[in-house]
Amino acid sequence: MDSHGHGHGHGHSNTPAPLGPVAARIVVGLLVAIGLCVIGGAIALWPSQQHVDVPLPFNTSGGRAVQSEAGTIVSQDIGPCGSASSGRVFTGNPTPPASAGYDCQRSIVTIDSGPNAGTRTLIEVVPGPGQPDLRTGESIRLVRQTDPTGTTQYSFNDYARGLPLAVIVGVFAVVICIVARWRGFRALLGLIVAFGVLVGFMLPAILDGAPAIPVALVSGAVILYGVLYLAHGVNLRTSSALLGTLMSMALAAVLSYVAIRMTHLTGLSEEQNTDVQAYIQQVSITGLLLAGFIIGSLGVLNDVTITQASTAFEIASADATTTRRQIFSSAMRVGRDHIASTVYTLVLAYAGGALPLLLLFSVTGRSIQDVLTGDAVAIEIVRSSVGGIALALSVPLTTAIAAMLARPGGPPEPSETPVKKAGRHSR
């Protein structure tokens, strides 16, 4: 039940304890002040509408973004490469190669979208590591470009995953809504809000050259306000979790900055970061790394803080004689278990994502010290450590805030206790 308070001696056992107006006003006032700062920061950091050229590896010969079209593989065989129809548009059968050379996998693909829909093209793939293993009947995406002579060329881009991804996401949404019901639906709306903030504000602002840490903090705060209040309702229980999460996020930002400076992490061990540095010079790789640390910590912080706030309020509701110290101690026992399990989750999640990298290192013969202190692995170590520190400190911080709100004035007066007990028995 919301914590706006029916607990002034009415005897409802499922109602949180009385709320002190001073404590409530302090928390609400802080959240309003932080919210106003976030709005001001968003206005100041809002990306301009300036045009950003498409970087060289991702554009066509005319300087435009690469266009992709849908295609379906209708036939396939193994034969000599070098057909003049490779990548070209035709309607019948492809032209045979002029001379017999090395063999390759030849796939005839119908073009299902774009200006040449209904025609065909030929994709020749030399078998080998990293090459796609195409099969008849598969749906793929084709890159459409125009060469200097004005001829349209098609090449393999990727597999078409739209339908299977939609099915998987649909099943995820249905299961969440069935199990968590209305609250699960609101949580899904919060995910949409988070995605909208990242795509609509954070990425354009970083691309515009804005400093990454303020952008990440503003984006994270907007996401937290939207996600927490959407999923858990507008009440003091949620507000205590929100305040704890915002403070922990700011702490994670400071820790991330200090850790990256101390360890001299560059992020250039990751290919994507190297591409960003080479083709989008106005973006700071270190700033991008910091923003990733901050945003990456939000999910686990949100999980822990809302659990601690709920635990504190439930303990206060269960026994009207419980003091703030007892609420804090009891909730912290739950929090310690949560920290232990979540730290494992945090570290193992990063380790799972780095498995290919660790596998490569395991066959290079390098010492374990060199592997652990290398930029690529050190990034994951620092990310896990910063997230773990922020996680651990968020537990007592949020628990203290929630205990103050759930029992702001200590236990009720003795004269109130019989009234409450009578209320329980009257039910």
Image (cartoon, rainbow, N blue to C red):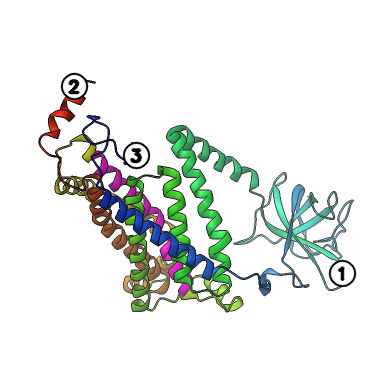
> Which amino acid, by three-letter code, is at mark 1?
Gly
Name the image quarter holding the C terminus. top left
Above/below status of 235 relative to 370: above
Sequence-earlier tag: 3 or 1? 3
Name the residue carrying label 1: 150
Name the residue carrying label 2: 425
Main secondary structure along the magenta-highlighted residues: helix
Q: Residue at x 65, y 56 (%)?
A: 132
Q: Element type at marker 3?
A: loop
Name the foreground residue: 98 vs 323: 323
CB of mark 3 within 8 Å of CB of mark 1?
Answer: no
Q: Position of residue 49 (x, y in %)?
A: 65, 69
Q: Position of residue 305 (x, y in %)?
A: 32, 51
> Which amino acid, by three-letter code, is at mark 3?
Asp
Above/below status of 337 relative to 279: above
Name the residue carrying label 3: 2
Q: Quadrant of residue 249?
A: bottom left
Residue 313 shown left or right of residue 252 in the figure: left
Q: CA distance from mark 3 to mark 1?
A: 66 Å
Name the foreground residue: 416 vs 17: 416
Q: Position of residue 327 (x, y in %)?
A: 18, 45
Range of residues picked out in magenta: 287-315
Residue reaching furthest to the right: 92
Give the mark toward the camera: 2 or 1: 2
Q: Quadrant of residue 290?
A: bottom left
Q: Residue at x 86, y 66 (%)?
A: 151
